Image (tube, helix red, strand yellow):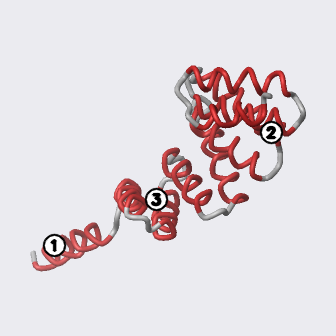
Amino acid sequence: MKKLLLLSFIMITCSTWAQSANAYFDKAMSKAEAGNTKGAITDYTKAISLNSKFVEAYQNRGVAKLKLNDLKGALADFSKTIELDTMNADAFTGRANVNYKLQNYQGAVDDCTSSLGLNPKDYVAYNLRALAYNKIGDKKNACKDFSKAIELGSQSAIKNKATFCK
């Protein structure tokens, strides 16, 4: 009986120490909201180590890495998110943003196009695709996308259209 009680006590103690992937994800979210981006990345990584298919953890870690300008890390996380969930429009837009910053403008256009195929009301993707079109010299499509972004409510597209579509 004593051995059974001791074993039960040890198991309860260990389960209290061990945290689930969801618990680490929740901690990461709290840290991200508080501005502790590095701490959030650490906890997203712990969540992923416990659940290698944790789509939201990869995506949010990608956002956090982008915030810290870890472009290669963000690119890898957004790509993994897309690998796990091909219907995730936000992951395509996130990866497009990274591709744009890496000066892979065609990659940004392609990712924005994929995102817009999944969410045609994403004015961020229209504005970003317009900026990428502008960088590759496709002014016609850039101005068309700026107009669509404005129609959907983008304030920055108004400034961009005034700058690039004269």
Q: Residues within 10 Å of mark 1 (few under 14, many from 20)?
A: few
Image quarter hosting the C terminus: top right
Q: Which residue is mark 3?
A: 47
Instruction: Say whether marks 3 and 1 touch (CB < 8 Å).
Output: no
Please give left or right for residue 156 compared with residue 166 in the image: left
Three-letter residue code for mark 3: Ala
Q: Say which quarter of the image contains residue 108.
A: top right
Mark 2 or 3, nearer chain start: 3
**Quadrant of residue 36 in the image?**
bottom left
Circle 1: element type = helix
Location of residue 51 with respect to 18 vertically, above or below: above
Name the side, left or right, on which 23 lies relative to 8.
Answer: right
Check disc 2 and give the amino acid type. Answer: Gly
Please, is residue 48 above or below residue 38 in the view?
Answer: above
Task: Mark 1 vs mark 2: give the one in front.
Answer: 2
Task: Report which residue position mark 1 lands on.
Answer: 4
Q: Give the quarter of the figure containing the N terminus.
A: bottom left
* Secondary structure beneath label 2: helix
Estimate the x, y position of residue 8 in percent, counting from the top left: 18, 70
* Mark 3 or 1: the one toward you: 3
Residue under pointer 2: 107
